[in-house]
Image: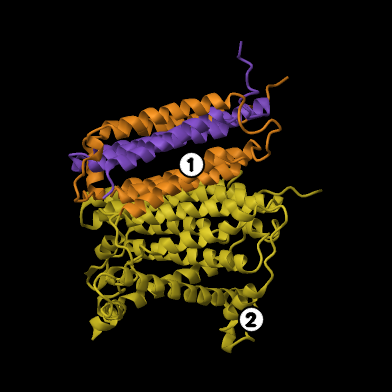
Chain colours: A orange, B yellow, C purple
């Protein structure tokens, strides 16, 4: 099991690094897709099948395509003349390194993180998820439905061409 | 004897695997099934290509290929040899890595979708609880390959074809999912094995296939339309329209990579026909209970090849749709009808057995179709065009 | 069986890589890519804690992760719509050049 975990973790982290380091924006988007796929496989390894397939369907099938379309519509594939990193890039790097240091210290010094978990995989059927969504989590479900409708209408309105005002 | 013929591949797999030590047996069993799928589906692809060329030829009042073997049966082999021996040309400014990966991603993703289809009794490669969700997740990943092919070629026509292709595929993904959700709702499970088992019952000799119910027929028609659009087949093949876009997103591909795209497209057609068969036509169950002696996998492949024949027939008959007509059709006609179909399926379940549910559900669906299709015909941009001739 | 700390460290690493990407790149779309990576890292954390926690049959972690996926998709759509709209107005997506409201 551990070998698979190391391979998947390496794949995910490599995809994420490529997504933020590469110069060509479309290559970044494709590397992001690899990172998403690696994460979906990690979810499958954690016996969260529904979450893994939802990750592939939503992130790779929709969000990655959205990012790619946005890159094409804003002509992001032409490299800018001043380089791809912003002026204050060392500051950002230091901040990210500090965040990782704090999180890593918290994980490595915690007692519960190294406890062996339950070995029996929880059998989660889609029936259980359906019952949970309609029972205990029905309010978040309705709110997310409202949010998605608002996001759909809002995104269309924000990105729509404005009508020419009559002169 | 009948059960042996039905389970012959399962028994063969068990017999071959029993020669190995117990540690290797699960891996060997899976590998044997994978080898079986990789051997069978490309053979079906060759058969489908032959059927297409002969069928389209006859529909266009000409013979298809008839030189290479008896009735041209060896033509796909000749095509394969030609594709393999052609020079592989990659444009100088093309993005080499992405250009190489696009057909690979397509073929891998399409074959992974076949893994959850129940090909016969006990013959599903991976029997998952959320098998249908896995299939749709793999279908969503094919769009990325189309985009990669179009963008990496650095060619205006490829990019245009790829953008049209991706827009069409994401538009028709929603009706595809929604028409399958009606089946899931009635069966109560996302597992394709349970969906087939629920359809494998017989009343007075006739099966309980979902296509024989009003909501099932409507859902099957919408699934077929969405499947035709998902696989970029006529009449939705504007992304590869030969008269406009050279060859669309695979303009810059030659040789083996083109053969891989071709393989991916046809195996995609086979796999989505397999899904349609599983969801609506009863999968591996026989049409009449007296015909139950025929092995289950023969029924599955017969239904899939029948669906391929319908695909070819539609290609030879209908003209190509324009991009905006296609998108209007998806969002303004098919999608509302799939949502109504969900409601009708719920009504079917609530009303319980009896003739009332047949009458009510059929009436609602026919009324909705009549209102949207017939009245919509009178609006200008959906109905037939009015021409104004020069005087 | 990998300990929980393995998954948490991978999630922390993904989070900081996403943060670095969001803070150091010029193109607005790459900032959004960094944000998506951060959301994914949080999802991995949720699922890992759900799996190794005391009551996995309560499905809390998986539900939270599924809702997070839905919300992240909505946010990506609106964010990218905004980027397209800004590009239409200013003809650039370079964040260093979009400093009209500064000072």
Residues packed near mark 1 inside 10 Å, few (<14), some (14 to 19) or many (20 plus):
many
Determine whether C73 is above or below B310 in the image.
above
Q: Nearer the viewer, residue B15 or A101?
A: A101
* Residue A91 on image: x %, y %: 53, 24
Please give the chain letter of the residue carrying mark 2: B
Is residue C87 at least partly visible in the picture?
yes
Q: What residue sits 46% from the left and 29% below the top?
A: A96
Query: Farthest residue in the right direction?
Result: B391
* Residue A145 on image: x %, y %: 36, 34
Is residue B370 at least partly visible in the picture?
no
Q: Secondary structure at mark 2?
A: loop
* Residue C30 on image: x %, y %: 55, 34
Q: Nearer the viewer, residue A13 or C22?
A: A13
The quarter of the picture where residue A137 lies is: top left
* Residue C44 on image: x %, y %: 35, 40
The quarter of the picture where residue A159 lies is: top right
Q: What residue sits 63% from the left and 81% below the top?
A: B65
Q: Secondary structure at mark 1?
A: helix
The Cα–Cα distance between marks 1 and 2, rounded to whole angstroms, is 54 Å
The numbered mark at residue A16 is 1
The numbered mark at residue B249 is none
In the rendered view, does C16 fall on the left or right side of B189? right
In the rendered view, does B40 fall on the left or right side of B91? left
Please give the chain letter of the residue carrying mark 1: A
Query: Farthest residue in the top direction?
Result: C103
> How many badges with numbers are in the image?
2
Q: Nearer the viewer, residue B23 or B258?
A: B23
Q: What residue sits 69% from the left and 51% below the top?
A: B154
In the rendered view, does B236 fall on the left or right side of A101? right
Residues packed near mark 2 inside 10 Å, few (<14), some (14 to 19) or many (20 plus):
some
Which numbered mark, 1 or 2, is in the foreground of this view?
1
The numbered mark at residue B63 is 2
């Amino acid at each position: 099991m551990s070998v698979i975990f190391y391979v998947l973790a390496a794949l995910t982290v490599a995809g994420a690094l490529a997504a933020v380091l590469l110069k060509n924006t479309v290559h970044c988007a494709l590397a992001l897709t690899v990172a998403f796929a690696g994460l979906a496989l990690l979810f499958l390894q954690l016996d969260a099948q529904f979450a893994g397939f939802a990750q592939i369907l939503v992130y790779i099938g929709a969000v990655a395509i959205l990012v790619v379309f946005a890159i094409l519509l804003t002509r992001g594939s032409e490299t800018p003349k001043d380089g791809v990193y912003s002026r204050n890039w060392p500051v950002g790097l230091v901040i990210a390194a500090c965040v990782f240091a704090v999180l890593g210290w918290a994980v490595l010094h915690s007692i519960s993180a190294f406890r062996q978990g339950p070995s029996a995989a929880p059998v989660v059927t889609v029936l259980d998820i359906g019952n949970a969504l309609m029972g205990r989590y029905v309010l978040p479900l309705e709110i997310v439905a409202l949010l998605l409708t608002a996001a759909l209408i809002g995104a269309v309105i924000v990105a729509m061409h404005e009508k020419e005002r009559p002169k | 004897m009948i059960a042996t013929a039905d389970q012959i591949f399962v028994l063969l797999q068990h017999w071959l695997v029993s020669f190995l030590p117990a540690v290797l047996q699960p891996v060997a069993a899976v590998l044997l099934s994978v080898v079986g799928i990789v051997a069978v589906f490309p053979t079906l692809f060759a058969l489908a290509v032959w059927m297409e060329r002969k069928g389209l030829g006859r529909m266009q009042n000409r013979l298809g290929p008839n030189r290479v073997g008896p009735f041209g049966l060896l033509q796909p082999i000749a095509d394969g040899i030609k594709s393999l021996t052609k020079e592989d040309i990659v444009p100088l400014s093309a993005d080499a890595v992405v250009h190489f990966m696009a057909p690979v991603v397509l073929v891998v993703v399409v074959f992974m979708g076949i893994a959850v289809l129940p090909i016969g009794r006990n013959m599903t490669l991976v029997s998952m609880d959320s098998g249908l969700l896995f299939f749709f997740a793999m279908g969503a990943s094919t769009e990325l390959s189309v985009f990669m092919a179009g963008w990496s070629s650095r060619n205006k026509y490829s990019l245009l074809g790829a953008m049209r292709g991706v827009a069409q595929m994401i538009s028709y993904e929603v009706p595809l999912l929604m028409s399958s959700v009606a089946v899931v709702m009635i069966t109560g499970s996302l597992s394709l094995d349970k969906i087939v088992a629920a359809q494998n019952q017989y009343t007075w000799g006739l099966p309980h296939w979902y296509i024989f119910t009003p909501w099932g027929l409507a859902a099957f028609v919408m699934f077929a339309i969405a499947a035709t659009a998902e696989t970029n087949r006529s009449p939705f093949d504007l992304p590869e329209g030969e008269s406009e876009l050279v060859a669309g997103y695979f303009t810059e591909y030659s040789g083996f990579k083109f053969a891989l795209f071709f393989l991916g497209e046809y195996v995609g057609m086979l796999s989505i026909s397999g899904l349609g068969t599983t969801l609506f036509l009863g999968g591996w169950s026989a049409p009449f209970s007296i015909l139950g002696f025929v092995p289950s996998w023969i029924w599955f492949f017969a239904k899939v090849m029948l669906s391929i024949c319908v695909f070819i027939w539609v290609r030879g008959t209908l003209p190509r749709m324009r991009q905006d007509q296609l998108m209007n059709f998806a969002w303004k006609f098919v999608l509302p009808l799939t949502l109504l179909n969900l409601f009708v399926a719920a009504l079917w379940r609530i009303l319980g057995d009896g003739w009332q549910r047949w009458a009510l559900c059929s009436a609602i669906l026919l009324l909705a179709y009549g209102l949207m299709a017939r009245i919509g015909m009178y609006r200008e941009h959906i109905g037939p065009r009015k021409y104004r001739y020069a005087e | 069986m990998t300990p929980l700390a393995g998954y948490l460290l991978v999630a922390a690493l993904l989070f900081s890589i996403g943060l670095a990407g969001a803070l150091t790149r010029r193109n607005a779309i790459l900032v959004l890519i960094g944000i998506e990576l951060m959301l994914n890292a949080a999802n991995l954390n949720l699922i890992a804690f759900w799996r190794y926690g005391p009551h996995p049959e309560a499905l809390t972690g998986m539900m939270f992760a599924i809702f997070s996926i839905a919300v992240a998709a909505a946010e990506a759509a609106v964010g990218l719509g905004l980027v397209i709209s800004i590009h239409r107005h200013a003809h650039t997506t370079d964040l260093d050049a979009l400093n009209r409201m500064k000072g």
